[in-house]
Image (cartoon, rainbow, N blue to C red):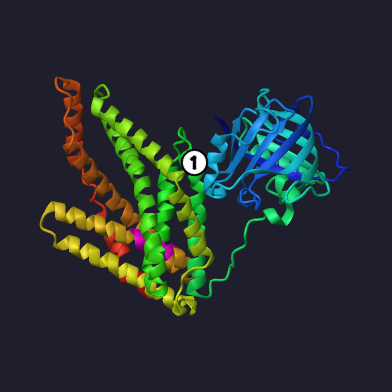
Amino acid sequence: MAAHVEVERKYEADSGFSLPDLRDVPGLSNAAEPRHHTLIAHYYDTHDLRLARQGITLRRRTGDTDDGWHLKLPKPKGGREEIQRPAGAPGDPPPAELADLVLAYTRGGPLVAVAEVRTDRTERALLGQDGIVLAELADDNVTGIRLVPSPDGATTWRELEVELVDGAEDVLNSVGDHLIGFGAHASEAPNKLSIVLGADAAPEDHPAEMRTTAQVMSAYLGAQAARMLSYDPWVRLADHDDDSVHKMRTSIRRFRSILRTHRKLVDRARTESLDAELKWLADVLGEVRDLEVLRARLYAQLFDLPVPPAEPGWLVEMEHQERLARERLRDVLSSRRYLALLDRVDGLVTNPPLRKQAHKAARKQQRKVVTRAWRKMVGAYAEAGKATQESDRNAALHKTRKAAKRLRYTAEAAEPVLGKPVGKIANRAQKLQDVLGDNQDRVVTAERLAQITPEPGSTSGAYALGALVTLQRCGDPLADLPKTWRKAADRKLIKQL
């Protein structure tokens, strides 16, 4: 499945706009001879435009060297990734592989043609001093027709699109500034489809006010639900390894944490069963993530040895276990249970089961919620101090880590109301979480290594296992804990709220 990350800038221009001399742009030496194309694209979506409202486009386009199906997914950190499949025959439905990647959005609803867009394109390669193509400039005259719910009148406009090829991002900025200087202006439309579909394709607006705890919770839960959904396609991609499993799992943890730390303000009859389903999903993600982290740690330690041994069979087997866990995860993401869970999350975000107290002024309530979470962290750490056995202490420290994580998420949610002081609490809780996380990784790795038996007669495998067991005992991951704890547990932070 072909894919590439798309980084581009779009500009609007009227019909009388004249393209300026691009050799005047810093860093560019010339523009190649123009190439002309006529592109015909049919865009597919659900009848209620679920993909378009999330900035996702799925189209079948012909008329250029990249004829085919194109799925464009927004990247969480900016830009879009385009995934391509062959065009097939006219009238063919979208490829199953692409439909599966957006299943979390469509929830199994049919994908239909919602718009037809014709683009008369003049394309120029923008060259650097050494002749390398830094970017592509497309000068488009566009005609779009909306097909759903029924064919509508044509919309026409002119658009300039600058897409990065082998240049740095400042090339896009320089070219854009040059175009604006000659009369173009930055486009507010995320893509051509959004212009054709108009307001129906606009993302849903969420109230920006943070006067009540209900508004604070709704904003945070909505953001985490959207974040969880945004990572779903990347988790599904078999060959995609960008920490997406971890990030999707973290968004679920944040969602659950807010429901738990605000449990006095919600109808728990509605939230507890949802929390159990979210835990189920987080556990499935966790199976992959835990193996991912463990293997990465062991590989790094093993091949950092003065004389790295051959890869032991038990480590190969661990990689196989991770692949199987990823297959199970992809099956779960295509299950009715998962899609039903997403519907329930949507329902809770749209209509949160809040008690009357949640509609009171946010500031006082958020202080209480954050303070309660802080005290739970302090209590968990006190239990660790009482432990006499190393195993008991490690268990208590792990509990402290989870409490610090919950405090961090609660403080993040409250920051729009409580400002910088609670932001500092979140920051210090994260640092404590990181220190305790390093210790937990060591504990988990040691436990997993103790369960492994090297292959009979394999001196290399036995050496690797012995070296790794020894490495888990080296160093002290808790060396920074006293200092980190003093900062995280500083009562002044709570008094400043």
Q: Residue at x 60, y 30 (%)?
A: 85
Magenta residues, start to end: 405-412
Q: Visible in this render: residue 70?
A: yes
- Image coordinates of residue 30 in percent, x first then y, are 75, 27
- Name above or below for residue 225 compared with residue 259: above
Quadrant position of the C terminus in the picture: bottom left
Q: Nearer the viewer, residue 348 or 437?
A: 348
Image quadrant assignment for residue 34: top right
Residue at the location (33% across, 72% down)? 372
Residue farthest top in this picture? 457
Q: Which residue is depicted at the point 61% across and 40% down?
A: 72
Residue labelled with disc 1: 234
Residue 223 inside the magenta-drawn segment: no
Please tell me which residue lies in front, 283 or 180: 283
Label 1 Cα neighbours within 10 Å, binned few <14 / some 14-19 / many ≥20: many
Residue type of the residue flagged with mark 1: Trp
